[in-house]
Amino acid sequence: MADMERINTPVETAIAEHFAGAKAVLPGDAGARETAFARFAEAGLPHRRVEEWKYTDLRSVMREAAPLAPALADDDAVAALEASPWFAGIEAARIAIANGHVVASASDFADLPEGVSLETTAQALASGHPDLAALGAIPEASENIAYALNSAFMSDGVVIRVAAGTKVETPLHLRFVITGDSAVATATRTLVIVEKGASVTLLESHDSADDVAHQPNNVVEIVAEDETEIAHFRIDGHGSGAQALSTLTAHLGAHVAFDTLNMIARPGLVRHQVFMTFAGEHSKGGVRGATMLGERQHADTTLFVNHVAPHCESRELFKTALDGNATGVFQGRIAVAKEAQKTDGQMMSAAVLLSDGATMNNKPELEIFADDVLCAHGATCGELDDDLLFYLMARGIPRPEAEALLIESFLGETVEEAVDETDEAMREALMGVARTWLAARG
């Protein structure tokens, strides 16, 4: 029997129409865009029968396909950026991206730290910049539908290179905002190449207006050469109407120290994907996340850690607090190749359910082909500890404040593990996300 042709949904048809109209004007290799879009055209929007999207059924959730956002007027872009609070207290070199387009007038391009070079992704695509050869360093990400859609539609972002041996003292802050009363889609791509022996801190923040169904699809790719040190802190502050997709890839060489922390608060629907590959020996990678959900919000963190080199260590810790009728998802997979002996991989997801209507889906996995490894995974779900609540309330702390203290402590473990103990400003900036959510919860 011949295979039945897949029938597009109205949203998939609209996405195809958007691509047909955009591909001629988007910068770069049209053939590469066609190849990426062909992956989407063959598979369609992910749905619950696709195992890695089992808990986030985009085909059912997406009712409309928003058009690709045009560039904003500078005044409108600056106003939107000024309203975004994330990392405001951190001294950093700011790189502003509003409605999917770099805003030079709101960026510190003239004051980049020594050893840091930058070009916009739009310029790099138009000129065929040689650094673009580093895109798609992790094949598993390239096969992902969200990544493929980003590759088909990507319009702007930045390409950053940190010179060998450079110790960048000032963080680089990628500021993404989306504004407007009508829903728009964005497809930004950022590539960060850190040369041998260099170190850098990357901040990444996302913001959009509440109650508008914006559809951002953001990809950040990090290529860490040997003996590099990279810290990456990300805040997802998209509004409650957004349907946000994001992908982080990290390709690690030898003797690399890499840490990433993602904080999610107040989303409509968020899926954050992390693909990390240990390609060189004696590297350490930490992937952490803190998610705060309420009402009918939905957040999905999906992680794939691939150990293909020996003597490496990975640590994954995710904490989720759920209230109302919110749904949380954690899917984590550690794969250890036969050659990756002496791998040490530990993965944990913990959730606290603050209401009867909240749901948490945990799916940790290990796939091990080596015989000399130390790997483990775990997942827990539960309520706040009644004994601890009683202890605090017996000392005169009202129940709402006692709950807030316990939730803040629960989420704060991810921050304590990721942030240098001497960096009080960074700790406060990240914990401020949790405190803002707790204050709104009451």
Image: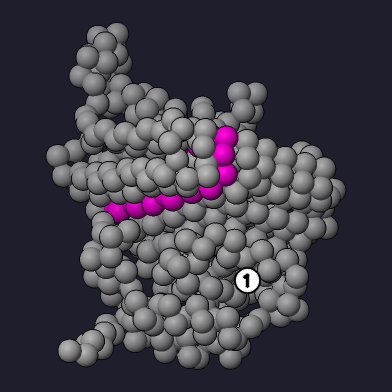
Q: Main secondary structure of the magenta part?
A: strand
Color style of the picture:
one colour
- From this viewpoint, is residue 7 visible? no
Q: Nearer the viewer, residue 12 or 240?
A: 12
Front-lying residue, 362 or 117: 362
Residue at 46 percent of width and 73 percent of height = 149
At horizontal 28% and vertical 75% (from top left) the residue drawn is 63
| Residue 306 drawn in magenta | yes
Q: Is residue 188 one of those drawn in magenta?
A: no
Task: Tell me the amino acid under the disc marked 1.
Answer: Asp
Q: Nearer the viewer, residue 157 or 341?
A: 341
- Taking 312 as reference, is 151 above or below it? below
Exactly how many numbered labels are in the figure? Answer: 1
Which of the 4 quarters of the picture holds residue 349?
top left
Q: Residue at x 48, y 91 (%)?
A: 20
Q: Which residue is mark 1?
A: 156
Left/right placement of residue 248 relative to residue 28 reads left
- Which image quarter is the N terminus in? bottom left
From what the image shows, is residue 127 above or below residue 229?
below
Residue 130 location in percent, x, y? Answer: 75, 70
Quadrant including the C terminus: top left
Q: 144 above or below 182?
A: above
Residue 187 in percent (x, y) is at: 52, 70
Disc 1, SS: loop
Residue drawn 44% across and 30% down? 374
Q: Residues within 10 Å of mark 1 (few under 14, many from 20)?
A: many
Read off the magenta span. 297-316
Question: Quick check: 416 above or below 280?
Answer: above
Where in the figure is residue 206, as x and y percent of width and height?
Answer: 52, 55
